[in-house]
């Protein structure tokens, strides 16, 4: 079964004749569905076809959730580094979940964890939108943010 470069079916024909037709048009004969009976072949520019597939694959970015972990007693410079990493994740189109982990007696000062998350949010206020506000879940406070829509 042969399909030409415009997408029209030319019917069933021998492989040699299909190859000849492809060469006359300066194209390639590509087997599209080898398991079909009869096998389906298409006349196309194979290099262009591969390029378009590569281009299509390159432009699709699946948004994932990245996690940035902090502690209530994090150093200001360390927080800057974590915020810079979160900014990079957001620019790539991912969501970012900030997690503040508590150990031992740190649970008595949950406000320190909230303060750290608020500072991170303050640093990113120009690019983020809060999807899920900060809330306490066991021994951790989590907050989910996404990138603001471009204008």
Image (tube, rainbow, N blue to C red):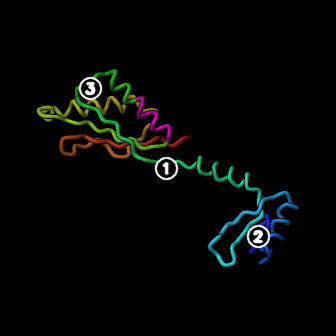
Magenta stretch in the rendered image: 84-92
Q: Secondary structure at mark 2?
A: strand
The residue that disc 1 covers is: 62
> How far separated are the C-alphas under marks 1 and 2?
33 Å
Q: Nearer the viewer, mark 2 or mark 3?
A: 2
**Residue 19 image-quadrant placement:** bottom right
- N-terminal label among 2 and 3: 2
* Left or right, residue 66 beside residue 52: left
Main SS, magenta region, reads: helix
Residue positioned 78% across, 71% down in the render: 15
The residue that disc 3 covers is: 74
Residue positioned 72% across, 63% down in the render: 30
> How far separated are the C-alphas under marks 3 and 1?
31 Å
> How far separated are the C-alphas under marks 2 and 3?
64 Å
* Left or right, residue 122 beside residue 20: left
Mark 1 residue crowding within 10 angstroms, few (<14) / some (14–19) / many (20+): few
Q: Secondary structure at mark 3?
A: loop
* Left or right, residue 149 beside residue 80: right
Q: Residue furthest right?
A: 24
Q: Residue furthest front?
A: 16
């Amino acid at each position: 079964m042969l399909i030409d470069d415009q997408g029209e079916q030319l019917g069933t024909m021998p492989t040699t004749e299909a190859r000849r037709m492809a060469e006359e048009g300066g194209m390639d004969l590509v087997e599209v569905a080898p398991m079909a009976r009869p096998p389906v072949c298409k006349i196309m520019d194979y290099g262009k076809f591969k390029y378009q597939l590569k281009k299509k694959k390159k432009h699709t970015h699946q948004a994932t959730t990245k996690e940035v972990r902090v502690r209530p007693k994090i150093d200001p410079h360390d927080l800057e580094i974590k915020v810079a990493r979160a900014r990079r994740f957001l620019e790539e189109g991912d969501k970012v979940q900030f997690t503040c982990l508590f150990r031992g007696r740190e649970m008595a000062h949950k406000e320190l964890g909230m303060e750290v998350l608020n500072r991170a949010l303050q640093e990113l206020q120009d690019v983020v939108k809060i999807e899920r506000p900060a809330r306490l879940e066991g021994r951790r406070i989590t907050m989910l943010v996404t990138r603001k829509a471009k204008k």
